Image (cartoon, coloured by chain):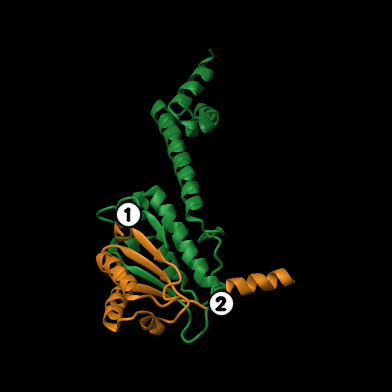
Chain colours: A orange, B green
Amino acid sequence: MNQLIKCDLLILDDFAFRKIDQPSSEYLYTIVDNRYGSKSIILTSNRAMNDWMGIFPDPVMAGAILDRLTHQAHQIQLKGESMRKKLAQKNLT
Amino acid sequence: MQPDTQLKSQLKRLKLSGVIDTLDMRLLESQQNQLDYLAFLSLLLQDEIEARQMRKLGRLLQQAHFGQEQTLESFDFTAATSLNATLIRELATMRFLTHGEGVILIPPCGKPAKLTSRKRSAMLLVATATLYAFTNSTTYFPSSPKPISPASLTLV
């Protein structure tokens, strides 16, 4: 936990991929809250940001986490074929 | 023992393999250009520093398990037209770390999961972060009042 709070850059890949339970969201909140304003987080997600709320059991907790994650964050929206789909096509030809 | 052999064994003992690798070349160079002692020594030490940085980078990249190598230089921004090249390049300077700003990589609104460019740019950011972490050099932060400590990367 301490390492996740203190490291200079934390990368969460495939954020909001699955629903998470209350203890996990509390854990995530502690990390995000402690890093907020001083240490960066990079998030990558396959879901649109509007859908992120739905993975948390408690909407208040969700709001607190997402506020901190998205405030002052650079957003990059991406297009493009799935990497695995592309690779599969490549292997066929 | 030849002076050359003795020097090389001394360098080896001090673990200055970077100097050993370029010694002959630098020696020739300094004779040709009539470099003074200080400049010669400085060149050699710089070689050692760079060799150590390269070794560290290699180690960090291996630990990070990126799977596929991705660099900013090799990234085709013309193919990924949805990407804001300026923003990506700005992010790659890693200046956002000094302010604790976040970066969010998301799919286009309402579209199903897409992976390529997202993964790729995430990877190149991570690669640059690693690069920064290993150099921890102030060159990335020319105007930064307080260079941050060597970055530790955590992939979750």
Measuring 58% from the left and 75% from the top, which residue is drawn there?
A82
Residue B71 lies, in percent from the top left, at 52, 59
Asked if residue B26 can be seen in this view, the reply is: no
* Residue B86, horizontal then vertical, whole percent: 44, 69
Between B3 and B42, the one nearer to me in the picture = B3
Location of the N terminus of chain A by quadrant is: bottom left
- Do callouts 2 and 1 mark residues in contact (Cβ within 8 Å)? no
Q: Amino acid at mark 2?
A: Gly
Specify the quadrant of the image occupied by residue A77: bottom left
Task: Describe the element under mark 2 as helix, strand or loop.
Answer: loop
Helix or strand or loop: what does disc 1 sit on? loop
User: What's the amino acid at mark 1?
Assistant: Pro
Q: Residue furthest right?
A: A93
* Tag of residue A63: none
Residue visible at 27% across and 67% down? A30
Q: Which residue is mark 1?
A: B142
Q: Are marks 2 and 1 on the same chain?
A: no
Q: Which residue is mark 2?
A: A80
Q: Quadrant of residue A70?
A: bottom left
Alpha-carbon distance for marks 2 and 1?
A: 35 Å
